[in-house]
Image: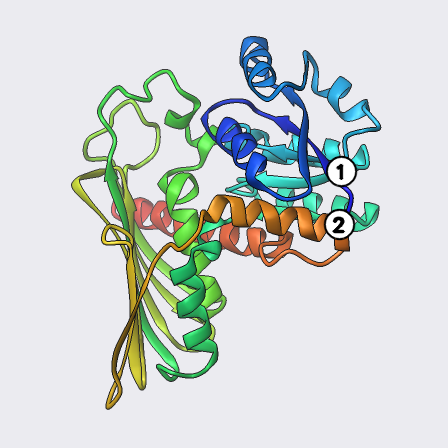
Amino acid sequence: MKDVRIGIIGCGGMGTHLARSCLQVHNAKIVGTYDAVEEKAKFLAHQLKCDYYDSVEDLLDKPDIDAVIVATPNYTHSAFTIAALKAGKHVFCEKPMALKLEDCDAMIGASEKQGLTLMVGHVMRFYHGCAFIKRALENGEIGQPIISHVFRTTWVKVGAWSKSWRCKKELCGNSLFEVAIHDIDLMRWFIGDVKSVKAYSSNFSHPEFDYDDSIIAILRFKNGALGLLESGFSSRLGDHKIDVNGTLGAANIDFKALTVKVAVEGRGERKEPLIKSNPVVDELQHFVNCVSTGKKPITDGLAGRGAVEIALAISRACEEAAQMNG
C-alpha cells in the first residue's frame, strides 16, 4: 500500500495534535500545512519537516497531496471541506461536521460527486470501551435499550474565551457542538435516531458567551427509548459518563475512571478499560485505510450529519422553551 500524502488545514491545538498523531499511522505522510496565521503553519511545518503554504488554494493545488485534515474553527469546516473535495482531495474533518444541516448536505454531496472519502472526527467510536459497549448492544446482551443518561459537563473559567470564536454562537454553536457532539454521536450509535426533543438552557456563569452555558435535554428515540443529556460549561466539578439501560441489563462508560462495564441479570458484570491503544491514531489509521481501499468510514458524512441534526434539534428546543417562558 502506497503512502497517503496529507495536508493539514488549521495548525492550532487540534490540527497540531492530529498532524503529530499521523506520525504513528502506517502509510501516512504529512507533506504540507496551512493556517490563517502563517506563523502557525510555518512552525508546524518546521517540526514535521514539510512544506507550508500561505494560502489554502496553493495547498489544494498541489497534485502530490492526496488528502487533507480540516482542523479549523467550527464555522469554517464546510467551506474548507468542500473546497478540498472539489480539488480532488479526500477529507478528514474534525467534529462538529458543520453548524447547519444544509452545510452537512453540501459536504456529503461534494464527496459523493467526486467519489472521495469524507470522514468526520468522532474519535470516541475508536475508544476500546465504546466499541465494547457497541458490540454488547448488537449482541443483545442488555436487551432492548430503554433509557440512556449522558453527562458531559465541565467548567470554563470566566474570561478564558472572551476574545475567542468559541464565545460566539454563530461561530462555534454551543457546548453541544464544542464537546457534547461526541456523546450525541455515541448515543445515536448505540440507540439510533431521535424522534423528538424537549430541552431547557440558561447562561449562569459566562456573560461573555452569547449562548447559554448549561443545557438539559430529554430525548425520545425512534425505537421508543428515552434519553437524558446534560451539557455545559458551568459545572465546577464536571462529569462525563454515559449509561444505557436495557430490558436485560445495563452498560456504563465512566470517562473519568477510564472504565466501562456491562451488567446482565444472572451473569454479573464484565469490565473493560476505556482505552487500550491511542484512539486518535486508530481513528486516523482508519481514515488512511479507507482512502487506500475505498471502504466507507464508520464515521462518514451521514454519521456526522446525524449528530449535528440532534444538536440542532436540542438547541431549537431550548430556544422554544425560552420563548414560552418569556
Please count the marks in the image. 2
| Residue 57 or residue 319, whichever sits in front | 57
Q: Is residue 122 left or right of residue 31?
A: left
The residue that label 1 is drawn on is 85
The residue that label 2 is drawn on is 292
The residue under the point 27% across, 56% down is 241
Q: Is residue 37 left or right of residue 263?
A: right
The residue under the point 34% across, 33% down is 211
In the displayed structure, would residue 161 be above or below residue 290? above
The residue under the point 77% across, 18% down is 58
Q: Is residue 15 left or right of residue 257?
A: right
- In the rendered image, is residue 121 in sight? no
The location of residue 323, given as percent across then percent down, is: 32, 45
CB under 8 Å between callouts 1 and 2?
A: no
The residue under the point 76% across, 55% down is 293
- In the rendered image, is residue 131 in sight? yes
Q: Secondary structure at mark 2?
A: helix
Q: Tell me, for residue 61, which label it has, or none.
A: none
Binning the other alpha carbons within 10 Å of mark 1 as few (below 14), some (14 to 19) or many (20 upward) gives many
Q: Amino acid at mark 2?
A: Ser
| Residue 231 or residue 325, whichever sits in front | 231
In the displayed structure, would residue 181 be above or below residue 131? above
